[in-house]
Image (cartoon, grey):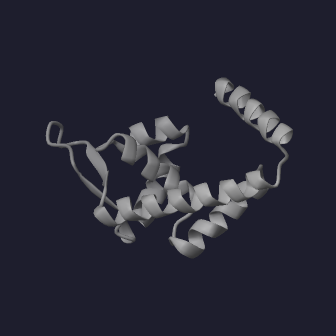
Amino acid sequence: MFVLQHSADELLDFHVGVGLSSVRIMSALDKSAPQSQRAIASQLKQTEANVSRQLKAMKKQGLVNVRLNKKDKRQREVVLTSKGSRSYDKACRLLNAQQKEFLKLLSANEHKAFEHAINNLLKAV
């Protein structure tokens, strides 16, 4: 499993300039934005400190904007920039292509067993 994550990280870093952690944050923001840093951390089951470090790097890259919440000025909201949306789209295309290549290595029975195992794991989280 870690080998696949490492491979995805390398692919993303080379072609998009981000890692898998950033893509996960972009995914959360793509589904529902704006979001607070706390909401992102909760959704991804990560610490706020970890998400904060990622967001700082992503902001420097121009992938996200952090702004004050209009209803509560003490809170900040995070949104994808247009560059962030384009990077997320590219990352998704690359990851989907990589996944297809990996799955080509499996027989039909192995593929079915793999999907079954993944679905069982997803039910547990």
Q: Nearer the viewer, residue 53 or 14?
A: 14
Relative to the observer, which residue lies in front, 23 or 91?
A: 91
- Give the residue at the far front of this rendering: 108
**Quarter of image, res 102:** bottom right
Please determine whether, in this image, residue 76 is positioned above or below residue 23. above
123 relative to 77 in the view: left or right? right
Q: Residue furthest bottom?
A: 14
State the residue at coordinates (38%, 70%): 60
Q: How many marks?
A: 0
Query: Could you tell me residue 69's position as x and y percent?
Result: 20, 43
Q: Nearer the viewer, residue 119 or 39?
A: 119
Outermost left residue: 70
Position of 109 with respect to 93 (left or right) is right
In the image, residue 18 sits, relative to residue 103, either above or below, namely: below
Q: Residue at x 59, y 58 (%)?
A: 95
- The spot of residue 100 in percent (x, y) is 67, 54
In percent of the image, x 38 and y 47: which residue is there?
30
Measured as percent of width and height from the top left, residue 61 is found at 39, 71
Quadrant location of the C terminus? top right
Query: Residue 93 vs residue 68: left or right?
Result: right
Say which residue appears at 72% left-offset and 26% top-offset.
120
- In which image quadrant can residue 88 be found? bottom left
Position in image of residue 113 (x %, y %): 81, 34
